[in-house]
Image (cartoon, rainbow, N blue to C red):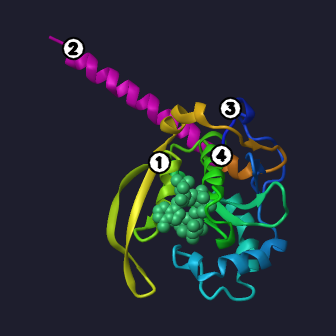
Amino acid sequence: MAGLSPRRAMFPAKPPPGPASEPPQVETRRLRLRALRLTDSARVRRLAGDRAIATNTLLIPHPYEEGMAEKWILAQPERYRKGREVTFAIVPRAGRLLVGVIGLRLTKKHSRGELGYWIGKPYWNRGYATEAAEAVLRYGFQTLGLHRICAFHFGRNPASGRVLQKLGMTYEGTERQHILKWGTFEDLAGYGILRAEFEAREGRYTGARVSSGSGTEAADSVSTFRSSARREKLKKAASNMAASTANSKP
Ligand SMILES: CC(C)(COP(=O)(O)OP(=O)(O)OC[C@H]1O[C@@H](n2cnc3c(N)ncnc32)[C@H](O)[C@@H]1OP(=O)(O)O)[C@@H](O)C(=O)NCCC(=O)NCCS
């Protein structure tokens, strides 16, 4: 569980070559999404250390102790290289300070990503989560070639549900009391969007760019998503054809 635009032509069909340990920079109208840096640690600790963030997320610790942010940030390059996770700092283009974090946990086998995000409380309700998440959906589908992106939120966190609705994701149901969080069983609401659905919405988006520079290896490591998805499609088409030929026999 966790939150674009421009046209397809702005995204390279193949990621540009560059250092492999971090994702490329992505820009939206107001935001810059970039790899986390150690210098973000204090901001991460301060913003994510707010109980309001931890209570609505699965993995953010509370209290957020000294050293935790550094450890987490230092773990990111390897997770990216292995194609397990892509995580971005969210920074307003007009400033330099991180206001939130967003990312995708990747499941290669199923060509799937799970979107997760948080925005520091002082920055809520400015549309940042939605704007950043649109860019990440685009990155996931177009650069990584994912087939599906899903996201989950606690039933008592309607703001996150609203973000997912604004992204055009489909509500797929609630798993009742699925998570034991701080001693309470919490409902988990699930949303999903398929690449075809995202592409169908594309005309309405306005604005994100993936810059060149880095991000190749993880994108490469998941680029097999594309070819295996294509293979599956062809296989399905072949079997449909065989079935319809069989059905059309007298
Ligand atoms: C959820 C979260 C990321 C939203 O970030 P944000 O930048 O404020 O999101 P946006 O501004 O893009 O959109 C928020 C939407 O929720 C709506 N909203 C806010 N509080 C709400 C509430 N209590 N009930 C219903 N909708 C609510 C806003 O009005 C807005 O919708 P609108 O644009 O239609 O008016 C942020 O609140 C957060 O980080 N929460 C804690 C961590 C978290 O929940 N992470 C997600 C885990 S799944």
Q: What amino acid is found at the position of numbered circle 2 in the picture?
A: Ser
Horizontal and vertical percent for residue 8? 67, 32
Please report contact status of discs 1 and 2: CB closer than 8 Å, yes or no.
no
The residue at the point 50 percent across, 52 percent down is 109
The residue at 59%/34% (across/down) is 204
Residue 148 lies in the magenta-colored region: no
Foreground mark, 4 or 2, reads 4
Rounded to the nearest angstrom, the CA distance separating label 3 from label 1 is 20 Å
Q: CA distance from mark 3 to mark 4?
A: 12 Å
Q: Where is mark 3, residue-wise?
A: 7
Mark toward the viewer: 3 or 4: 3
Q: Which residue is mark 2?
A: 248
Q: Is there CB contact under 8 Å for labels 4 and 2?
A: no
Which of the two discs, 4 and 1, labels the residue nearer the N terminus? 4
Q: Secondary structure at mark 1?
A: loop
Q: Say whether marks 3 and 1 touch (CB < 8 Å).
A: no
Q: Which stretch is magenta?
A: 222-250
Please say whether residue 246 is one of the residues in the magenta stretch: yes
Towards the viewer: 204 or 190: 204
Q: Residue at x 70, y 33 (%)?
A: 13
Mark 4 Cα within 10 Å, few/some/many (few <14, many 20+)? Answer: many
Q: For mark 1, what is the residue?
A: 169
The C terminus lies in quadrant: top left
